[in-house]
Amino acid sequence: MSQFSFVSLFDKYLVASLCKIVLFLGLFLHLASIFLFKDPNCSSPYELLESSNNINPPISSNPTNLSHLLFGLLGSQKAWHYRKNYIESWWRPNVTKGYLFLDVAPNATLLPWSKNSPPYKVSKNITKLVQETQHVAPIQARMVHGIMEVLEQEHEGVRWVVMGDDDSMFFVENIVDVLAKYDHNKYYYFGAQSEYILSNFWFSFDQGFGGAGFIMSFPLAKALAQDIESCLRRYPFLNSADLITMVCIVDLGVGFTPLKGLHHLDMRGDISGLLSSHPKIPLLSLHHIDSIAPIFPLMDRAKSLKHFMKAAKFDQSRLLQQTICHHRLSNWTFSVSWGYSVQIYERIMPRSHLIKPIQTFKTWIKKPKSPPYYMFNTRPRTNDSCEAPHVFFFKTIGKMKNKNEIWTTYFRSEARGLPSCSIDGNHSANYVNKIQVYSHRAKRTEMDRCECCDIIHTSGSNKATIKLRECFTNEKIA
């Protein structure tokens, strides 16, 4: 009996040892297969687990650039004769991607087609759709239908679709920089509200006004294009292309995100007050060029825009960015709108006051009711010598040799026509007729804080020099 128990116990130990050997051998072979025969296209379970836990993956290893934008511009053959100069001031042939959609084919006076203009397409005939739905606004329906027609063109690699009019002026480098901060794989609908309060009230506070340009991420644009004709059938009673577009996008479950750098410019006349106190965000677009005065004195609209783009070609990131500094010895305040204007005030004034535009412009409606009129605060025009600025406009630009700087010059366009400020210790600036501004060549990638500046000026000299720089810690502009 004892001999039988001994043999049985021996067998158990033998089996256990063999199991251990098989287990270790299997583990060894498994690990060897992972390291020696791993398919580079496959992920291990651990890698898959790590990937699933990555809640915020990178937007893209390839940063957004101009080739990722597709522009769709809607215009008319009749207006293109004089509006093409607006578009050609910013369009980059063979670089910018997009099309101009005309209502009818161009006539003989527009042919041969300019190489400096976007390639054109003729909008599709949607008469049958308009008649079937009895649409109240056929022209507006054609503009909305244009979104689908843009997406029907070649769009390989497109991340963002930018829609505009034939008088929309875009600042493409700034647009690229702004959009690069967003994930183009998600659904985004960017645009501009109207500057005029009643325009938003009449249509919607939650729509992008198309002339300023509205921007859609490609997934949204694709979904919208597939639903355009169905949406036009749902809303035949709406008479605004921008409003129709907005409700179609809302029906896809997407909301509106305003971008203040887009400007519809629902105002008339002299907009120099607005351009001299631009918000602290990149300039993205201007619109309604035909409704405003030329932005520079002694130039027509086309020449003004071409002149403005001279500064834009050097540095779009600083374009219209307001920088304020003080010359304490003279009690002067300088306000620089880079690439556009410089103002001198004959007293020390805080930035909190000067960021409000002087209301040089008129309302969109000629005889509006009582204010407020605008979606932003303004300062009234005044003949008070201590409140009214001396104004200098952008003239020339260049790069400093052997220095990492750009220089711009600004000249007085006309005398202010007022006596000097009578506050004790203040000095007249009537004799200053030229201002030179130096800025860094490197564009500003962050807008969390404005730049500051230093002034070099000798009493009695007709010239002042301003050097832009980053603000010191806790530096106050007041």
Image: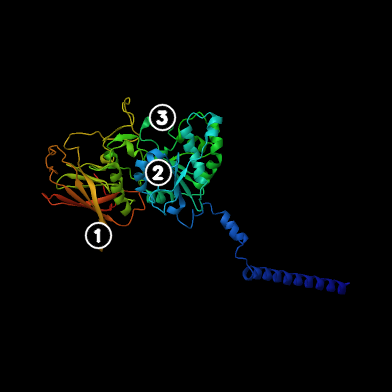
> Judging from the image, what secondary structure is the residue with disc 1 in?
loop
Q: Is residue 374 above or below residue 333?
A: above
- Point out the image quarter for the N terminus: bottom right
Label 1, residues with CA under 10 Å away: few <14, some 14-19, many ≥20: few
Circles 2, 3 touching at the beta carbon (< 8 Å): no
Could you tell me if residue 170 is visible in this image?
Answer: no
Q: Residue at x 65, y 71 (%)?
A: 32
What is the CA distance from the residue labelled 1 to the residue labelled 2? Answer: 46 Å
Q: Residue at x 39, y 31 (%)?
A: 199
Circles 1, 2 touching at the beta carbon (< 8 Å): no
- Where on the picture, by quarter, is residue 370? top left
Q: Is residue 346 above or below residue 38?
A: above
Left or right of 191 in this view: 33? right
Amino acid type, residue under disc 2 in the picture: Ala
Outermost residue to the front? 108
Point out which mark residue 400 bears: 1
Left or right of 367 in this view: 415? left
Q: Is residue 39 above or below residue 104?
A: below
Amino acid type, residue under disc 1 in the picture: Met
What is the CA distance from the residue labelled 2 to the residue labelled 3? Answer: 42 Å
Give the label, 1 or 2, closer to the camera: 2
Left or right of 294 in this view: 135? right
Could you tell me if residue 234 is visible in this image?
Answer: yes
Amino acid type, residue under disc 3 in the picture: Phe
Outermost residue to the right? 1
Residue 322, x across and y down, in percent: 28, 46
Label 3, residues with CA under 10 Å away: few <14, some 14-19, many ≥20: few
Residue 127, x across and y down, in percent: 52, 34
Residue at which label 3 appears: 201
Residue at which label 2 appears: 108
> Judging from the image, what secondary structure is the residue with disc 2 in?
helix
- Point out the image quarter for the C terminus: top left
